[in-house]
């Protein structure tokens, strides 16, 4: 019984690593080309130059949010379908266990995705002093913004 309970958690590390690697691979070109920075009104600054520093921050933040998203998607359904009244109901009505597990998984994703986006909002800020020197020279705002992506 303990082995069955642990098997439900085996997919978590694999899924988190896969989501993180996928995000890195899909956005790796941004690490070499950079991302544009904007002012608080969304106007592109520095004559459209792209910052690799900002790209690195954006890609790593997105990778982290993808890994965090796996937490509610894997742990909440596993715990709810293993412990408590839902587990008892699933044991009594085996035919409905898959349906209930799927529904709990969908709810977990439905709550987990907005929470993950709230942790790392799409538009993020960075201090001018953290940017490349050639971009700093073209910007007068102390705080600039960038689209991190989702």
Image: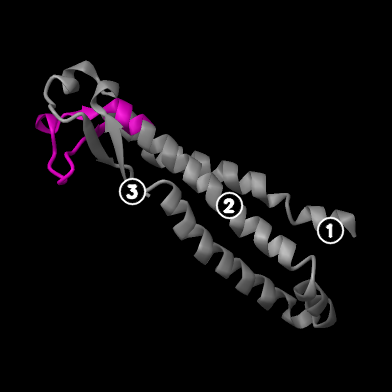
Q: Position of residue 82 (x, y in %)?
A: 79, 65
- Helix, strand or loop at mark 3: loop
Q: Do the residues labelled 3 and 2 touch (CB within 8 Å)?
A: no
80 vs 2, left or right, is left
Residue at 23 percent across and 26 percent down: it is 128
Q: Position of residue 4 (x, y in %)?
A: 84, 58
- The image shows residue 27, relative to residue 15, as above or below, that is above
Q: Position of residue 38 (x, y in %)?
A: 18, 38
Q: Nearer the viewer, mark 1 or mark 2?
A: 2
Residue 19 painted magenta: no
- The image shows residue 137, relative to residue 147, as above or below, that is above
Residue under pointer 1 = 4
Q: Nearer the viewer, mark 1 or mark 3?
A: 3
Residue at 50 percent across and 47 percent down: it is 66
Residue 70 circle label: 2
Residue under pointer 3 = 122
Magenta residues, start to end: 34-56
Q: Quadrant of residue 30?
A: top left
């Amino acid at each position: 019984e303990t082995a069955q309970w642990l098997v439900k958690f085996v997919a978590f590390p694999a899924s988190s690593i896969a989501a993180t690697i996928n995000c890195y691979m899909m956005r790796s070109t941004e690490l070499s080309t950079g991302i544009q920075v904007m002012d608080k009104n969304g106007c592109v600054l520095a004559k459209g130059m792209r910052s690799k520093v900002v790209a690195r921050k954006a890609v790593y933040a997105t990778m982290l949010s993808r890994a965090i998203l796996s937490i509610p998607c894997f742990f909440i359904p596993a715990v709810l379908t293993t412990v408590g009244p839902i587990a008892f109901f699933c044991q009594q009505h085996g035919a409905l266990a898959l349906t209930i597990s799927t529904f709990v998984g969908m709810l977990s994703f439905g709550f987990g995705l907005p929470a993950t986006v709230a942790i790392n909002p799409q538009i993020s800020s960075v201090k001018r002093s953290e940017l490349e020197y050639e971009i700093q020279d073209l910007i007068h705002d102390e705080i600039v913004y960038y689209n991190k992506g989702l």
